């Protein structure tokens, strides 16, 4: 295992996901159901599936497009979403 990549990924995901809407959903579902363990297990499974899909897709796309294209495309999509949010279209 490449620990530097592991720790960089873990840190980036941790801070990116901290206090976002999925965390708020988990809080609400746990409060409403009164079953925090079930909500936690469901959340973990959901994150695992989404992460597996994104990692597999990224592994495929890097072979087809290359890392530089993926980096610029991702940045462009984030900028476009920001513009759409600020202009009230989203």
Image (spheres, helix red, strand yellow):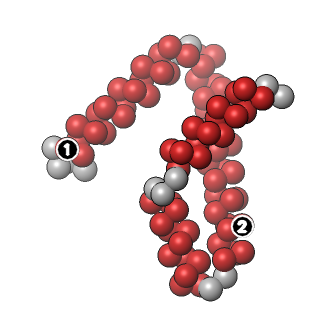
The kind of secondary structure element at disc 1 is: helix
Residue 81 higher or lower than 35, as above or below: above
Residue 54 at x, y percent in the picture? 60, 38
Name the residue located 24 percent from the left edge and 46 percent from the top edge: 85
Mark linked to residue 48: none
Please give the label number shown on residue 86: 1
Q: Residues within 10 Å of mark 1 (few under 14, many from 20)?
A: few
Which residue is pictured at 72% across the width and 33% down the height?
6
Q: Is residue 33 above or below residue 79?
A: below
Asked where in the image residue 31 lies, by quadrant, the reply is bottom right
Task: Name the image quarter holding residue 37.
Answer: bottom right
Q: Is residue 39 in sight in this rendering?
A: yes
Of residues 48 and 64, the one nearer the viewer is 48
Residue appearing at x 42%, y 23% in the figure: 73
In the image: residue 88, left or right of residue 75: left
Q: Residue furthest right?
A: 1
| Quadrant in the picture for residue 29 | bottom right
**Residue 12 place in picture, x, y as percent:** 57, 38
Q: Residue furthest left?
A: 87
Q: Name the residue that disc number 2 marks.
A: 41
Quote the CA–CA distance across marks 1 and 2: 35 Å
């Amino acid at each position: 295992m490449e620990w530097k990549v592991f720790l960089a990924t873990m840190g980036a995901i941790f801070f990116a996901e901290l206090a976002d809407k999925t965390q708020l959903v988990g809080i609400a579902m746990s409060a409403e159901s009164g079953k925090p363990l079930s909500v936690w297990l469901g959340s973990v499974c959901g994150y695992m599936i989404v992460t597996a899909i994104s990692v597999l897709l990224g592994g495929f796309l890097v072979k087809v497009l290359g890392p530089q294209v993926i980096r610029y495309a991702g940045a462009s999509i984030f900028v476009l979403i920001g513009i759409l949010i600020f202009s009230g279209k989203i």
